[in-house]
Image: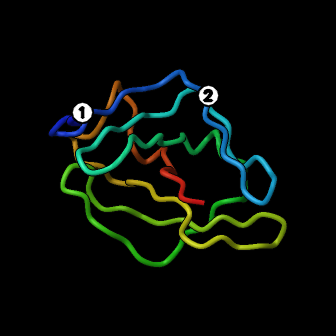
């Protein structure tokens, strides 16, 4: 099945729980589900639904033609740092905004 071009982004009521080191670090029922052409869907989690103090800005960045500049985030749980586990779009392109949601509230696609 081909995924949409440009990508699609919709607010999802599906519950998304992210654990790191056996601890829940994010829990939401209002993620933004993004379907892009080159990989499986990604759920972006609102920053308000991430446990306070877990995210610390990481070094590096990248560029998405649809979403804009990505900022990377480390997660720190019980004093242990997991490098570059998430990313966000602090100044998203107008084309990538969905249902009034703005990407700056999203810390996001988690890899850890």
Q: Residue at x 34, y 24 (%)?
A: 99
Dot in front, 1 or 2: 1
Q: Note whether 88 is above or below 84 in the view shown.
A: above
For this view, does 60 lie left or right of residue 19? Answer: left
| Numbered mark located on residue 15 in the image | 2
Residue count near mark 2 (Cα–Cα under 10 Å), binned few <14, some 14–19, many ≥20:
few
Q: Residue at x 78, y 60 (%)?
A: 21
Percent across and percent down for residue 61 are: 37, 71
Farthest right residue in view: 78
Q: Note whether 85 is above or below 43 in the view shown.
A: below
Q: Residue at x 70, y 73 (%)?
A: 81
Q: Quadrant of the N terminus?
A: top left
Give whichever of discs 1 and 2 has the lower sequence position.
Answer: 1
Q: Quadrant of residue 111?
A: bottom right
Q: Residue at x 54, y 65 (%)?
A: 73
For this view, does 4 lie left or right of residue 47? Answer: left
Q: Note whether 93 is above or below 65 in the view shown.
A: above
Percent across and percent down for residue 47 are: 57, 45
Farthest left residue in view: 5
Tag count in the figure? 2
Percent across and percent down for residue 62 are: 32, 69
Q: Quadrant of residue 37?
A: top left
| Numbered mark located on residue 1 in the image | 1
Question: In whole angstroms, how far apart are the C-alphas of marks 1 and 2?
Answer: 24 Å
| Numbered mark located on residue 45 in the image | none
Q: Note whether 104 is above or below 63 in the view shown.
A: above
């Amino acid at each position: 099945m081909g995924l949409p071009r440009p990508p699609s982004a919709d607010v999802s009521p599906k519950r998304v729980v992210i654990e790191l080191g056996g601890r829940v670090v994010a829990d939401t029922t209002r993620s933004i589900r993004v379907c892009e052409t080159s990989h499986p869907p990604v759920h972006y989690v609102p920053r308000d639904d991430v446990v306070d103090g877990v995210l610390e800005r990481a070094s590096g960045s990248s560029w998405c033609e649809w979403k804009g500049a990505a900022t990377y985030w480390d997660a720190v749980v019980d004093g242990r740092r997991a490098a570059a586990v998430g990313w966000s779009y602090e100044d998203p392109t107008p084309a990538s905004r969905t249902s009034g949601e703005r990407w700056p509230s999203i810390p996001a696609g988690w890899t850890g």
